[in-house]
Amino acid sequence: KMGHGNIKMSNLWLKESENAENDLCWGCMMCSYTSEVWHFICPKCSSLNKMKWDKFLTVEIKGIPVEITRNKNLKEIIHKKNPEDAARGILDELRGGVDR
């Protein structure tokens, strides 16, 4: 929507949304699957009791959305110049799990 025709205000809120905090949701600590409801068994990787209530974000690498948890190491990996290194780093985190 365009803010009831107020394009200036609409653009302001679109700009603000870029810096908005992510909402809390359930996410698997093994594969980073996210859901609005808790699952004892992860629907994606079948891990038992690995769902955690946390802030998750979606990163797009080469047009493919990748869901990850907020993690200092992942943040550093994502900001590297080479997207292939970022993808490898995310896969390493997913394989090894995320320590919380």
Image (tube, rainbow, N blue to C red):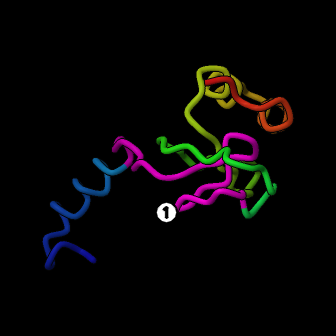
Q: Does the magenta stretch include residue 65?
A: no
Question: Image height check: is 32 above or below 3?
Answer: above
Residue found 61% across the figure and 60% down from its top: 39
Question: From the viewer's perspective, is 3 left or right of 95?
Answer: left
Is disc 1 placed on a helix, strand or loop?
loop
Identify the residue under disc 1. 36
Disc tally is 1
Which residue corresponds to the image point at 39% horizontal and 50% vertical from the top-left?
23
Magenta extent: 18-42
Disc 1 marks a residue whose amino acid type is Glu
Q: Which of 50 and 27 is in front in this view?
A: 50
Residue at position x 59%, y 21% in the image: 72
Instruction: Name the main secondary structure of what is drawn in magenta.
Output: loop
**83 left or right, relative to 10:** right
Point out residue 71 in the picture as x, y percentages from the top left corner. Answer: 59, 27
Q: Is residue 35 above or below residue 99?
A: below
| The N terminus, quarter of image | bottom left
Q: Position of residue 80 (x, y in %)?
A: 71, 25
Residues 52 and 49: in front is 49
